[in-house]
Image (spheres, rainbow, N blue to C red):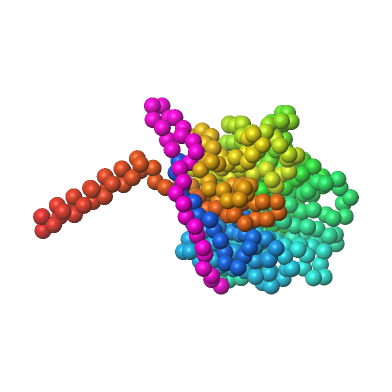
Amino acid sequence: MGMGLALRTRLLVVAGVVALGSQSYALTWSMREVVVPGESQLVFSGINNAGQISAEGWGTANIYRVNTNGLVETATPSVHQHTSVSSGGINEAGDVVVYGNPIPGSGRTKVGYWTPGVGMTDLLVQDNGQNYWFESFAMNNAHTAVGWAEWFGNGGTGGTGNAIRYSPTSSALLDPGYWDGYNLARDIDEAGSIVGCVNFNPIRWNPDGSYTGLALAGHYGVACSINSSGVISGILSNSTRRYLAIWNSSGQLIHKIDIGVRSVVPHPVGEASYINDNGEVVVTGVVNNSARQFFWSQSTGLVDFTDSITNRNGFNLTVIGINNRREIICNGYLGTNYKYNLLLTPVPEPSELIVLGVGLVGVALRQRRRKRIA
Protein backbone atom coordinates (compact mmCIF):
# COMPACT_ATOMS: atom_id res chain seq x y z
CA MET A 1 0.00 0.00 0.00
CA GLY A 2 1.27 3.47 -0.81
CA MET A 3 1.08 6.70 1.11
CA GLY A 4 2.49 10.15 0.70
CA LEU A 5 5.95 10.94 2.03
CA ALA A 6 6.69 14.32 3.55
CA LEU A 7 10.19 15.61 2.87
CA ARG A 8 11.55 18.84 4.27
CA THR A 9 14.66 19.92 2.39
CA ARG A 10 17.49 22.26 3.37
CA LEU A 11 20.87 22.85 1.76
CA LEU A 12 23.84 22.05 3.96
CA VAL A 13 27.57 22.61 3.62
CA VAL A 14 29.44 19.95 5.57
CA ALA A 15 31.49 21.22 8.50
CA GLY A 16 34.97 20.31 7.47
CA VAL A 17 37.18 21.38 4.64
CA VAL A 18 40.02 18.97 4.07
CA ALA A 19 43.28 20.12 2.49
CA LEU A 20 44.51 18.01 -0.40
CA GLY A 21 47.85 19.44 -1.45
CA SER A 22 47.26 23.07 -2.42
CA GLN A 23 43.53 22.56 -2.97
CA SER A 24 40.63 22.20 -0.58
CA TYR A 25 37.80 19.72 -0.78
CA ALA A 26 34.38 20.48 0.73
CA LEU A 27 31.59 17.93 1.02
CA THR A 28 28.06 19.22 0.46
CA TRP A 29 24.70 17.58 1.11
CA SER A 30 21.07 18.60 1.02
CA MET A 31 19.08 17.48 4.07
CA ARG A 32 15.65 15.93 4.02
CA GLU A 33 13.64 15.16 7.11
CA VAL A 34 11.62 12.04 6.34
CA VAL A 35 8.15 11.92 7.88
CA VAL A 36 5.65 9.12 7.28
CA PRO A 37 2.10 10.44 7.71
CA GLY A 38 0.41 8.85 10.71
CA GLU A 39 3.70 7.53 12.16
CA SER A 40 4.76 9.51 15.22
CA GLN A 41 8.04 7.64 15.69
CA LEU A 42 10.08 6.31 12.80
CA VAL A 43 13.38 4.43 12.93
CA PHE A 44 15.64 3.86 9.91
CA SER A 45 17.51 0.57 9.66
CA GLY A 46 19.30 0.63 6.31
CA ILE A 47 19.74 2.14 2.84
CA ASN A 48 20.68 0.40 -0.40
CA ASN A 49 22.47 1.70 -3.48
CA ALA A 50 19.17 2.50 -5.20
CA GLY A 51 18.40 4.92 -2.37
CA GLN A 52 15.66 2.77 -0.84
CA ILE A 53 15.42 3.02 2.95
CA SER A 54 14.09 0.41 5.36
CA ALA A 55 12.34 1.68 8.46
CA GLU A 56 10.03 0.66 11.25
CA GLY A 57 7.33 2.39 13.23
CA TRP A 58 8.59 2.52 16.81
CA GLY A 59 5.72 1.00 18.81
CA THR A 60 3.30 0.51 15.90
CA ALA A 61 4.89 -2.64 14.43
CA ASN A 62 4.71 -1.25 10.89
CA ILE A 63 7.55 -1.90 8.47
CA TYR A 64 8.26 0.58 5.68
CA ARG A 65 10.29 0.89 2.52
CA VAL A 66 10.79 4.52 1.64
CA ASN A 67 11.23 4.70 -2.11
CA THR A 68 12.96 7.17 -4.36
CA ASN A 69 9.66 7.92 -6.09
CA GLY A 70 8.44 9.74 -2.97
CA LEU A 71 6.05 7.04 -1.73
CA VAL A 72 6.14 4.74 1.28
CA GLU A 73 5.32 1.04 0.98
CA THR A 74 4.03 -0.58 4.15
CA ALA A 75 3.91 -4.08 5.63
CA THR A 76 1.56 -4.52 8.58
CA PRO A 77 2.24 -6.86 11.52
CA SER A 78 -0.54 -9.23 10.49
CA VAL A 79 1.49 -10.15 7.42
CA HIS A 80 4.21 -11.54 9.65
CA GLN A 81 1.94 -12.88 12.42
CA HIS A 82 3.60 -10.80 15.10
CA THR A 83 2.39 -8.48 17.80
CA SER A 84 5.49 -6.37 17.17
CA VAL A 85 8.06 -6.38 14.38
CA SER A 86 11.32 -4.63 13.66
CA SER A 87 13.21 -3.99 10.47
CA GLY A 88 16.77 -5.28 10.27
CA GLY A 89 17.90 -3.65 7.04
CA ILE A 90 17.45 -3.80 3.27
CA ASN A 91 19.28 -5.64 0.49
CA GLU A 92 20.16 -4.38 -2.98
CA ALA A 93 17.02 -5.95 -4.44
CA GLY A 94 14.89 -3.86 -2.07
CA ASP A 95 13.80 -6.71 0.22
CA VAL A 96 13.55 -5.77 3.90
CA VAL A 97 14.70 -8.22 6.57
CA VAL A 98 12.31 -8.40 9.53
CA TYR A 99 12.22 -9.91 13.01
CA GLY A 100 9.72 -9.69 15.84
CA ASN A 101 8.12 -10.88 19.07
CA PRO A 102 7.23 -14.55 19.60
CA ILE A 103 4.30 -15.75 17.52
CA PRO A 104 1.32 -17.13 19.50
CA GLY A 105 2.02 -20.56 20.95
CA SER A 106 5.76 -20.38 20.32
CA GLY A 107 8.70 -19.34 22.43
CA ARG A 108 10.68 -18.39 19.35
CA THR A 109 10.77 -15.14 17.51
CA LYS A 110 10.39 -15.20 13.77
CA VAL A 111 12.79 -13.92 11.14
CA GLY A 112 11.93 -13.27 7.51
CA TYR A 113 12.02 -10.79 4.70
CA TRP A 114 9.36 -8.63 3.13
CA THR A 115 9.16 -7.98 -0.58
CA PRO A 116 6.75 -5.15 -1.46
CA GLY A 117 4.06 -6.45 -3.77
CA VAL A 118 4.87 -10.06 -2.84
CA GLY A 119 4.64 -10.31 0.94
CA MET A 120 6.61 -11.95 3.72
CA THR A 121 8.91 -14.97 3.34
CA ASP A 122 10.12 -16.82 6.42
CA LEU A 123 13.77 -17.57 7.08
CA LEU A 124 14.58 -20.69 9.05
CA VAL A 125 15.38 -20.36 12.75
CA GLN A 126 16.53 -23.21 14.93
CA ASP A 127 13.95 -24.91 17.14
CA ASN A 128 15.56 -27.06 19.80
CA GLY A 129 12.75 -26.88 22.34
CA GLN A 130 14.15 -23.81 24.09
CA ASN A 131 12.95 -20.24 24.09
CA TYR A 132 15.07 -18.21 21.73
CA TRP A 133 15.05 -14.57 20.82
CA PHE A 134 16.24 -14.10 17.26
CA GLU A 135 17.22 -10.82 15.63
CA SER A 136 18.58 -9.94 12.20
CA PHE A 137 20.72 -6.99 11.14
CA ALA A 138 21.48 -7.45 7.44
CA MET A 139 20.65 -9.63 4.43
CA ASN A 140 22.21 -10.13 1.00
CA ASN A 141 20.47 -10.72 -2.33
CA ALA A 142 20.62 -14.50 -1.81
CA HIS A 143 18.37 -13.89 1.24
CA THR A 144 20.98 -15.04 3.70
CA ALA A 145 20.57 -12.92 6.81
CA VAL A 146 22.73 -12.51 9.90
CA GLY A 147 22.11 -11.52 13.50
CA TRP A 148 22.07 -13.08 16.94
CA ALA A 149 20.23 -15.78 18.88
CA GLU A 150 19.75 -15.63 22.64
CA TRP A 151 18.54 -18.51 24.75
CA PHE A 152 16.38 -17.16 27.54
CA GLY A 153 17.08 -20.16 29.74
CA ASN A 154 20.85 -20.01 29.64
CA GLY A 155 21.26 -18.27 33.00
CA GLY A 156 23.87 -16.03 31.43
CA THR A 157 25.31 -12.81 32.73
CA GLY A 158 24.06 -10.34 30.15
CA GLY A 159 25.72 -11.66 27.02
CA THR A 160 23.85 -11.64 23.76
CA GLY A 161 24.06 -15.31 22.90
CA ASN A 162 25.41 -16.55 19.58
CA ALA A 163 26.12 -15.03 16.20
CA ILE A 164 23.80 -16.68 13.69
CA ARG A 165 23.16 -17.02 9.97
CA TYR A 166 19.65 -17.52 8.53
CA SER A 167 18.49 -18.57 5.08
CA PRO A 168 15.25 -19.92 3.56
CA THR A 169 16.56 -23.49 3.95
CA SER A 170 18.92 -23.52 6.93
CA SER A 171 20.06 -21.78 10.07
CA ALA A 172 23.39 -22.10 11.83
CA LEU A 173 25.13 -20.69 14.87
CA LEU A 174 28.51 -19.35 13.82
CA ASP A 175 31.67 -20.90 15.25
CA PRO A 176 33.30 -20.07 17.63
CA GLY A 177 30.28 -19.50 19.84
CA TYR A 178 29.75 -18.45 23.43
CA TRP A 179 26.55 -17.72 25.27
CA ASP A 180 28.03 -14.71 26.96
CA GLY A 181 30.48 -12.01 26.01
CA TYR A 182 28.55 -10.07 23.33
CA ASN A 183 28.50 -12.22 20.22
CA LEU A 184 26.68 -11.36 17.02
CA ALA A 185 26.88 -11.10 13.24
CA ARG A 186 26.35 -7.58 11.87
CA ASP A 187 26.71 -7.65 8.08
CA ILE A 188 27.04 -9.99 5.12
CA ASP A 189 28.26 -9.43 1.56
CA GLU A 190 27.04 -11.02 -1.66
CA ALA A 191 29.81 -13.66 -1.53
CA GLY A 192 28.63 -14.79 1.91
CA SER A 193 31.40 -13.29 4.07
CA ILE A 194 30.06 -12.18 7.46
CA VAL A 195 31.42 -9.69 9.98
CA GLY A 196 30.60 -9.18 13.64
CA CYS A 197 32.16 -10.02 16.98
CA VAL A 198 32.76 -12.94 19.34
CA ASN A 199 33.34 -12.20 22.99
CA PHE A 200 33.53 -8.54 21.91
CA ASN A 201 36.44 -9.22 19.58
CA PRO A 202 35.88 -8.24 15.92
CA ILE A 203 35.76 -11.17 13.54
CA ARG A 204 35.11 -12.10 9.91
CA TRP A 205 33.50 -15.40 8.98
CA ASN A 206 34.42 -16.67 5.52
CA PRO A 207 31.87 -18.28 3.17
CA ASP A 208 33.37 -21.73 3.86
CA GLY A 209 32.68 -21.37 7.60
CA SER A 210 36.24 -20.58 8.66
CA TYR A 211 36.90 -17.32 10.44
CA THR A 212 39.55 -14.64 10.78
CA GLY A 213 40.09 -12.76 14.02
CA LEU A 214 40.42 -8.98 13.62
CA ALA A 215 41.26 -8.13 17.23
CA LEU A 216 43.90 -5.62 18.28
CA ALA A 217 45.79 -6.17 21.54
CA GLY A 218 44.47 -4.00 24.34
CA HIS A 219 41.25 -3.20 22.46
CA TYR A 220 37.80 -4.69 22.05
CA GLY A 221 35.08 -3.97 19.55
CA VAL A 222 33.05 -5.17 16.60
CA ALA A 223 33.36 -5.43 12.82
CA CYS A 224 30.25 -3.61 11.63
CA SER A 225 30.13 -3.47 7.83
CA ILE A 226 31.71 -5.13 4.80
CA ASN A 227 31.68 -3.83 1.22
CA SER A 228 31.80 -5.59 -2.14
CA SER A 229 35.63 -5.57 -2.14
CA GLY A 230 35.79 -7.27 1.24
CA VAL A 231 36.98 -4.13 3.05
CA ILE A 232 35.59 -3.96 6.58
CA SER A 233 34.76 -1.05 8.86
CA GLY A 234 34.23 -1.35 12.59
CA ILE A 235 34.79 0.12 16.02
CA LEU A 236 37.69 -0.50 18.40
CA SER A 237 37.82 0.80 21.98
CA ASN A 238 40.29 0.81 24.80
CA SER A 239 39.62 1.96 28.35
CA THR A 240 39.17 5.61 27.36
CA ARG A 241 38.99 6.12 23.56
CA ARG A 242 36.96 4.95 20.56
CA TYR A 243 38.40 4.39 17.10
CA LEU A 244 37.07 3.89 13.63
CA ALA A 245 38.81 0.77 12.31
CA ILE A 246 39.31 -0.25 8.68
CA TRP A 247 40.51 -3.74 7.75
CA ASN A 248 41.48 -4.80 4.24
CA SER A 249 40.12 -7.89 2.50
CA SER A 250 42.94 -9.98 4.03
CA GLY A 251 41.86 -9.02 7.55
CA GLN A 252 44.76 -6.63 8.21
CA LEU A 253 44.04 -3.46 10.18
CA ILE A 254 45.04 -0.63 7.82
CA HIS A 255 43.47 2.39 9.53
CA LYS A 256 42.73 3.25 13.15
CA ILE A 257 41.18 6.72 13.48
CA ASP A 258 40.37 8.39 16.80
CA ILE A 259 36.69 9.41 16.94
CA GLY A 260 36.46 10.54 20.56
CA VAL A 261 36.02 9.28 24.09
CA ARG A 262 34.40 6.06 25.18
CA SER A 263 31.59 7.66 27.15
CA VAL A 264 29.51 4.57 27.96
CA VAL A 265 30.05 0.86 28.34
CA PRO A 266 30.22 -0.41 24.74
CA HIS A 267 27.57 -2.73 23.37
CA PRO A 268 27.97 -4.41 19.98
CA VAL A 269 24.61 -3.13 18.72
CA GLY A 270 25.42 0.46 19.65
CA GLU A 271 28.92 0.28 18.14
CA ALA A 272 28.32 1.04 14.46
CA SER A 273 30.08 2.26 11.35
CA TYR A 274 29.04 1.85 7.72
CA ILE A 275 31.17 1.48 4.58
CA ASN A 276 30.12 1.70 0.94
CA ASP A 277 31.74 0.08 -2.09
CA ASN A 278 33.88 3.19 -2.66
CA GLY A 279 35.52 2.75 0.75
CA GLU A 280 33.71 5.77 2.23
CA VAL A 281 32.62 5.40 5.85
CA VAL A 282 30.20 7.16 8.20
CA VAL A 283 30.35 6.79 11.97
CA THR A 284 29.15 8.48 15.15
CA GLY A 285 31.71 9.48 17.80
CA VAL A 286 31.66 11.40 21.08
CA VAL A 287 33.65 14.64 21.41
CA ASN A 288 33.32 17.03 24.37
CA ASN A 289 30.43 14.97 25.74
CA SER A 290 28.34 15.31 22.59
CA ALA A 291 27.70 12.97 19.68
CA ARG A 292 29.54 13.91 16.48
CA GLN A 293 28.89 12.61 12.97
CA PHE A 294 31.92 11.77 10.84
CA PHE A 295 32.59 10.98 7.20
CA TRP A 296 35.86 9.28 6.31
CA SER A 297 37.56 8.29 3.09
CA GLN A 298 41.13 7.63 2.03
CA SER A 299 41.23 10.93 0.10
CA THR A 300 39.50 13.24 2.58
CA GLY A 301 40.47 11.81 5.94
CA LEU A 302 38.06 12.30 8.83
CA VAL A 303 35.43 15.02 8.26
CA ASP A 304 33.11 16.15 11.08
CA PHE A 305 29.80 17.21 9.52
CA THR A 306 27.72 17.46 12.72
CA ASP A 307 27.39 21.24 12.82
CA SER A 308 26.01 21.29 9.29
CA ILE A 309 22.95 19.24 10.23
CA THR A 310 19.99 21.28 11.37
CA ASN A 311 19.16 19.64 14.70
CA ARG A 312 15.64 20.10 15.97
CA ASN A 313 14.95 20.34 19.72
CA GLY A 314 18.26 18.85 20.80
CA PHE A 315 17.81 15.39 19.33
CA ASN A 316 20.76 13.01 19.50
CA LEU A 317 21.73 11.93 16.00
CA THR A 318 23.23 8.60 14.97
CA VAL A 319 24.31 7.71 11.44
CA ILE A 320 22.70 4.51 10.20
CA GLY A 321 24.12 3.98 6.73
CA ILE A 322 25.76 5.26 3.53
CA ASN A 323 25.32 4.00 -0.02
CA ASN A 324 27.44 4.22 -3.16
CA ARG A 325 25.69 7.46 -4.12
CA ARG A 326 27.03 8.94 -0.87
CA GLU A 327 23.50 9.26 0.50
CA ILE A 328 23.55 9.10 4.30
CA ILE A 329 20.74 8.28 6.71
CA CYS A 330 20.57 9.35 10.36
CA ASN A 331 18.20 8.53 13.21
CA GLY A 332 17.38 11.18 15.77
CA TYR A 333 16.23 10.38 19.27
CA LEU A 334 15.50 12.19 22.50
CA GLY A 335 15.20 9.93 25.51
CA THR A 336 13.20 7.01 24.14
CA ASN A 337 11.55 8.98 21.32
CA TYR A 338 12.61 8.50 17.69
CA LYS A 339 11.18 11.45 15.79
CA TYR A 340 13.87 13.06 13.65
CA ASN A 341 15.04 11.03 10.68
CA LEU A 342 17.30 12.50 8.05
CA LEU A 343 18.30 11.63 4.50
CA LEU A 344 21.41 13.51 3.36
CA THR A 345 21.81 13.70 -0.41
CA PRO A 346 25.14 14.84 -1.89
CA VAL A 347 25.25 18.02 -3.95
CA PRO A 348 27.74 18.03 -6.86
CA GLU A 349 31.02 19.77 -6.12
CA PRO A 350 31.91 22.87 -8.20
CA SER A 351 34.55 20.87 -10.08
CA GLU A 352 31.93 18.26 -10.94
CA LEU A 353 29.57 20.97 -12.18
CA ILE A 354 32.34 22.41 -14.35
CA VAL A 355 32.99 19.00 -15.88
CA LEU A 356 29.26 18.57 -16.45
CA GLY A 357 29.03 22.02 -18.01
CA VAL A 358 31.95 21.36 -20.34
CA GLY A 359 30.33 18.11 -21.37
CA LEU A 360 26.99 19.80 -22.11
CA VAL A 361 28.74 22.50 -24.14
CA GLY A 362 30.49 19.78 -26.11
CA VAL A 363 27.20 18.05 -26.83
CA ALA A 364 25.64 21.34 -27.93
CA LEU A 365 28.54 22.17 -30.28
CA ARG A 366 28.44 18.69 -31.76
CA GLN A 367 24.70 18.96 -32.43
CA ARG A 368 25.16 22.40 -33.96
CA ARG A 369 27.88 21.08 -36.24
CA ARG A 370 25.67 18.22 -37.39
CA LYS A 371 22.90 20.68 -38.27
CA ARG A 372 25.33 22.76 -40.36
CA ILE A 373 26.49 19.66 -42.23
CA ALA A 374 22.91 18.64 -42.83
Number of residue marks: 0
Q: Residue 53 at what x, y percent from top left?
A: 55, 58
Q: Any magenta on residue 15? A: yes
Quarter holding the C terminus?
A: bottom left
Which portion, as a residue range, is magenta? 1-26
Q: Is residue 210 visible?
A: no
Point 65% across, 70% down: residue: 76
Point 75% across, 57% down: residue: 134
Magenta stretch, overall SS: strand
Point 79% across, 70% down: residue: 104
Q: Horizontally, is 357 left or right of 183 in the view?
A: left
Please determine whether, in this image, residue 39 is positioned above or below residue 272. below
Q: Horizontally, is 64 left or right of 24 in the view?
A: right
Q: Residue 238 at what x, y percent from top left?
A: 71, 31
The residue closer to the viewer here, 52 or 346, is: 346
The residue closer to the viewer here, 126 or 64, is: 64
Point 58% across, 45% down: residue: 274
Q: Is residue 258 visible?
A: yes
Residue 246, quarter of the rendered image = top right
Residue 1, quarter of the rendered image = bottom right
Q: Residue furthest top?
A: 22
Q: Residue furthest left?
A: 373
The residue closer to the viewer here, 127 or 246, is: 246
Q: Any magenta on residue 299? A: no
Q: Residue 370 at what x, y percent from top left?
A: 15, 55
Q: Residue 265 at what x, y percent from top left?
A: 75, 39
Q: Residue furthest front?
A: 313
Please determine whether, in this image, residue 97 is positioned above or below residue 4. above
Q: Horizontally, is 157 left or right of 293 in the view?
A: right
